């Protein structure tokens, strides 16, 4: 619950901006050329909009994800279920028990994402995005090779610069036929570059009580180590105070990384509705669904009786529902600044498990064009 306390403390910033900008709002209401809060998709959607020729945008997003408890497929598993019933793929190697004896029970990921966009012309917007990522995973270690005696618990923390995305967003509005002022269709072609590390190490507690510091499992690495292609297609439209849109986005690694593996390909679809109760404010509801494959290949340095060390325990199908708000400041120091927040909760999780399940997603962001 501490994570919600932290987020709740940030929300007054948005309300402050709203209060400061609440005056001359009416003046822009009927101006078709004016920027609207809903010109941007809900903030959890990336590469959703374009910029005019010569226009820059800088952005900062704080994104947080919490995971608590495990599941396999759609069924939840307790730590004891996993310690006694989930086979260890490394069983038979020296010191490796027949079942998983170290169980991740809780994880948080905090991401600070920095982005820039630039309108090359009316048809092409360039973008670059990178991040600083912090991960924490809490584990329980069961004693020896069998039974449910708990030996102890330990936390693993990793952090660092994440992978970097470079891309271009192309204007495909004309595909939709006769132009409408607020209707857009964009095709994004982007590449993810492996600027994040994938050889992080951390101290662990083994079932025998040893405390070595091996390479951490895949889930605790910061980068993918691979060059990925990330195409996406985004549609948006509006009519008066109501807006809607959708995006289909894929990601695929071109080849295995230096350690011998690549993350599974993913496909994400999302659709949203937005409502503008007053100028400068947009409220949104969004659904997303994502499918991702297992890790392909294996890092030979990652060997441990823990689910996260098994490349097969990655990927699956998940769907989330979100509510969000976009604010576009009107006056004084917030004029032209965008603030946005979005909270997501799971509605379906079918995981290649045992795997930690995602329980909440949160994004808070600032954007400014000039
Ligand atoms: Cu932008």
Image (cartoon, rainbow, N blue to C red):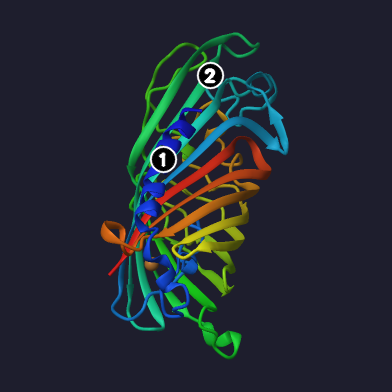
Q: Quadrant of residue 211?
A: top left
What secondary structure is found at the residue carrying circle 1?
A: strand
For the residue pair 311 and 329, the one nearer the viewer reads as 329
**Mark 2 or 1, closer to the camera:** 1
- On the image, numbered disc 2 is attached to which residue? 140
For the residue pair 114 and 243, the one nearer the viewer reads as 243
Could you tell me which quadrant the C terminus lies in? bottom left
Crowding near the residue tagged with mark 1, few <14, some 14–19, many ≥20 C-alpha atoms within 10 Å: some
Q: Do the residues labelled 2 and 1 touch (CB within 8 Å)?
A: no
Q: Vertical placement of 16 versus 28: above or below?
A: above
Crowding near the residue tagged with mark 2, few <14, some 14–19, many ≥20 C-alpha atoms within 10 Å: many
Q: In which quarter of the image is residue 130?
A: bottom left
Residue 15 is at least partly visible in this image: yes
Q: Identify the residue at horizontal 54%, vertical 88% (top origin).
A: 179
Q: Identify the residue at horizontal 40%, vertical 72% (top origin).
A: 27
The location of residue 297, given as percent across then percent down, is 53, 47
Q: Vertical placement of 148 versus 23: above or below?
A: above
Q: Identify the residue at horizontal 52%, vertical 36% (top origin).
A: 66
Q: Residue 18 carries which label?
A: none
- On the image, numbered disc 1 is attached to which residue? 110
């Amino acid at each position: 619950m501490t994570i919600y306390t932290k987020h709740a403390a940030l929300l007054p910033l948005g309300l402050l901006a709203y209060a400061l900008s609440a005056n001359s709002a009416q003046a822009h209401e009927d101006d078709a050329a004016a920027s609207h809060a809903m010109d941007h998709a809900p903030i959890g959607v990336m590469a959703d909009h374009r910029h005019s020729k010569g226009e820059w945008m800088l952005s900062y997003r704080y994104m947080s994800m919490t995971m608590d408890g495990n599941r396999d497929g759609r069924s939840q598993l307790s730590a004891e279920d996993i310690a006694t019933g989930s086979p260890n793929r490394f069983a038979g190697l020296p010191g490796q028990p027949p079942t998983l004896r170290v169980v991740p029970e809780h994880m948080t990921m905090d991401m600070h994402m920095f982005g820039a966009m630039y309108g090359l012309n009316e048809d092409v917007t360039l973008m670059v995005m990178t991040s600083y990522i912090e991960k924490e995973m809490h584990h329980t270690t069961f004693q020896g090779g069998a039974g449910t005696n708990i030996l102890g618990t330990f936390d693993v923390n990793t952090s660092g610069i994440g992978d970097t995305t470079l891309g271009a967003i192309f204007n495909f509005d004309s595909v939709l036929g006769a132009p409408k002022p607020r209707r857009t269709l964009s095709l994004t072609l982007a590449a993810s570059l492996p600027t994040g590390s994938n050889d992080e190490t951390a101290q662990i507690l083994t079932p025998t009580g040893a405390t070595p510091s091996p390479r951490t499992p895949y889930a605790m690495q910061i980068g993918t180590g691979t060059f990925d292609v990330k195409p996406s297609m985004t549609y948006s439209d509006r009519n008066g105070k109501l807006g809607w849109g959708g995006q289909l986005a894929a990601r695929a690694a071109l080849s295995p990384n230096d350690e011998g593996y690549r993350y599974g390909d993913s496909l994400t679809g999302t659709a949203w509705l937005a409502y503008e109760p007053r100028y400068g404010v947009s409220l949104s509801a969004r659904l997303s669904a994502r499918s991702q494959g297992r890790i392909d290949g294996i890092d030979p340095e990652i060997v441990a009786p823990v689910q996260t060390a098994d490349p097969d325990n990655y990927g699956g199908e998940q769907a989330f529902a979100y509510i969000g708000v976009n604010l576009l400041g009107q006056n004084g120091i917030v004029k032209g600044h965008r603030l946005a927040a979005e909270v997501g909760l799971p509605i379906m999780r079918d995981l290649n498990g045992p795997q930690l399940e995602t329980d909440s997603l949160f994004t808070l962001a600032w954007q400014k064009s000039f």
